[in-house]
Image (cartoon, rainbow, N blue to C red):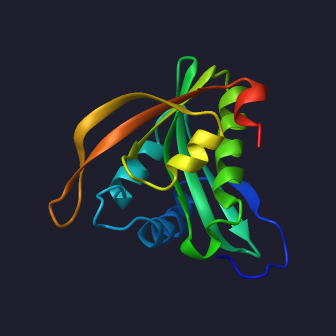
Amino acid sequence: MSTARASLPEVVAGGPADLDEVMATMHAAFDPCFGEAWTRGQCAGILGLSGVWLLLARVDGRAAGFALARMVLDEAELLLLAVAPAERRAGVGRLMLDAVAEGARIRGATRLHLEMREGNPAYFLYSAAGFIEIGRRSRYYRGKDGRIFDAITLSCPLDVETINAS
């Protein structure tokens, strides 16, 4: 649970210069036993591609979370969303999800997709935002200890009534 704050979370656009902050948040947020975290090289490589954007959440000037997304034709994909453990259950994840959805809408997307590990508690955040399961990838994630987990593919239409309903 988050401690008292002097200010509300702020969402700002990020870029390659923010990779240190992104990686620190990712390593704190993703347990290596699930195999969900990306490497610095993967993050740096995708940031240079067309249609990709990075958002950072900051609370009182410190990293609270980030989201990485991309646009392809008229659909968007949330590639990563991470919230620093000290900021969980305080609305940062929902704030980031809403900011990605708005960014996707502005770019012309009609749907937002994501994949997540089966059993990830973030499922409840996505479900509350209007995402539904549309598919699975068997044995997609491989944890550091060799355990294997399925991925769930979720999708949500980007109409104002759906993802912004709280």
* In the image, residue 91 above or below residue 79: below
Residue 116: percent from left, percent from top: 41, 45
Q: Report the front residue among 26 and 95.
A: 95
Residue 144 in which image quadrant: bottom left
Would you place residue 48 above or below residue 50 in this image?
below
Residue reaching furthest to the bottom: 3
Give the percent coordinates (x, y) of residue 13: 68, 51
Quadrant placement of the N terminus: bottom right
The spot of residue 39 in percent (x, y) is 34, 59
Q: Is residue 98 above or below residue 59?
A: above
Q: Is residue 141 left or right of residue 114?
A: left
In screen coordinates, is 23 left or right of 151? right
Instruction: Give the answer, above or below, for where 10 lies relative to 46.
Output: below
Image quarter hosting the C terminus: top right
- Seen at 80% across and 78% down, the residue is 5
Residue occupying image coordinates x 46% and y 36%: 49
- Given the current orientation, which residue lies at the most extreme left position? 146
**Residue at figure coordinates x 58%, y 40% from the top left:** 127
